[in-house]
Amino acid sequence: MDTGSTAWILASAMAVSLMVPGLALFYGGMTATKSTLNMMMMVFGAVALTGVLWVLYGYSAVFGNSYGGAGVLGDVTEYPGLGQLLAEQPDATLPPALVAAFQALFAAITVALVAGAVADRMKFGAWLVFSGLWVTLVYLPVAHWVFAFDSADGSVTGGWIANRLAAVDFAGGTAVHVNAGIAALAVVLVLGKRLSWPRPARPHNLPSTVLGAGILWFGWFGFNGGSALAAGNAASVVFLNTFAATCAALLAWLVVEKLRDGHATTLGAASGTIAGLVAITPSCGAVSPVGAMVVGLVAGAVCPLAVGLKHRFGYDDALDVVGVHLVGGVLGTLLIGFLATAEAPNGRDGLFYGGGFELLGVQAVAAAAVLAYSFVVTLVIALVLHKTIGLRLPAEAEQQGIDLTVHAETAYDLAPATAIGGGALPHPVATARIPGTVTDAAR
């Protein structure tokens, strides 16, 4: 057992766990005041549900021996409940339970990312049902394709993208960001636009959003660096590339904003940070530090333009999951085909380093496969739920605010009202609990 690497992955897993409140703050600050708590609940609810499913069968579906050696899905009966991972394995350099916990956080974050697209208008119960179905039918197969490698002795067959196609995806550009981004597009097409579209409420708490972005940046060092699965040179290179790309993306986004709108905004800085982190996720082990900055510059320049496409094509991606995660993930995946260098940990040369078009073609196939599968299956899941339990909140609940009507809470209670004569007025939380109100339908 490599105790140094074990300590590094433990630290990385703890850093990734901070991405949960980071994402809640990032998304929560971007919503209207009346739906802040709902957005945070969607993030935490998806994480909790995914964690339960991961223990029951998720880990097996991703890292179990592939059914028939086809590389499509792992054996869901191989590690049920994860009891088999408790004993120390003499031939393992890392505790299997630690790897399972680290990867569980990847699954949880991926599902939670989709929540940003459906902000302000989706039933909380329907969101949880959607999350469970989506992680089972979409994330687990795709993660098996990308993250499950064949064992050295050939006894375990992994996913087809990682092994047969041999695409480069160091930390989940396809399985996480392309997957979540295209799923977000599919579900909003079924869910429909907010009542306030195309002029929804402005972000109500930008300091919260910036704080969330900063926490996500910190957690991303564990997300990418921990994917090296060892404390060594590869993790160090990945750490450096992650930082370099994010800095470049933040600046590029601000330049685009300044040239296009005349202002470099705080929201733009936060969004540029996330765009850079998304784009470098698949390529952090494949490029040089200068190549990482190129990845960040391209993502920081293209993603703000992609965000504007929702107004041109009329889909209501509330918090820009499509424009940042889908577009940034695709860019980061494809740029490997141009910028990869054999001197980086992945050891592959792209077009600009004499490797020809082969790697670019491989990367394009991996991205296209995840795009097609995730979009189609997510669309089917959303349509089935729309026709059965319903996805959309009642119009009255959306207008009044999800926090109050669904959760019977408000994010801010700065000045409690008093009645004439000094008596306290009924608290909005208390009145929201009255049977027969819009609250019941909203749930």
Image (cartoon, rainbow, N blue to C red):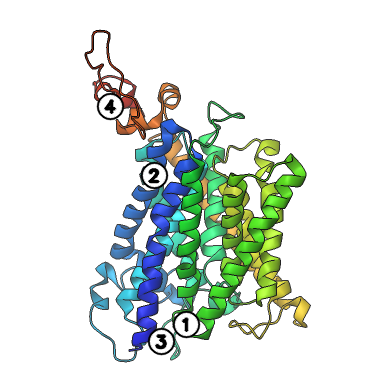
Label pair 1/2, CB-CB below 8 angstroms: no
The amino acid type found where label 1 is placed reads: Asp
* In the image, farthest residue toward the top: 421
Name the residue at 39% across, 78% down: 8
Looking at marks 4 and 1 on the same chain, the residue that comes earlier in the sequence is marked by 1
Q: Can residue 72 be spotted in the picture? A: no
Q: Which mark is residue 155?
A: 3
**Residue 370: which quarter of the image?**
bottom right
The amino acid type found where label 3 is placed reads: Ser
Looking at marks 2 and 3 on the same chain, the residue that comes earlier in the sequence is marked by 2
- Residue for badge 1: 150
**Side (left or right) of 425 relative to 63:** left
Mark 1 vs mark 2, CA separation in Å: 38 Å
Mark 4 vs mark 1, CA separation in Å: 54 Å
- For the N terminus, the image quarter is bottom left
**Residue 101: which quarter of the image?**
bottom left
Q: Could you say whether the residue bearing mark 3 is in a helix, strand or loop?
A: loop
Judge whether 60 appears above or below 329 on screen.
below
- Residue for badge 4: 429
Q: Position of residue 430 (x, y in %)?
A: 24, 24
Looking at marks 1 and 2 on the same chain, the residue that comes earlier in the sequence is marked by 2
Observer-nearest residue: 288 or 157? 288
The amino acid type found where label 4 is placed reads: Val
Name the residue at 52% across, 80% down: 236
The amino acid type found where label 2 is placed reads: Met
Q: Could you say whether the residue bearing mark 1 is in a helix, strand or loop?
A: loop
Observer-nearest residue: 300 or 172? 300
Mark 3 vs mark 1, CA separation in Å: 8 Å
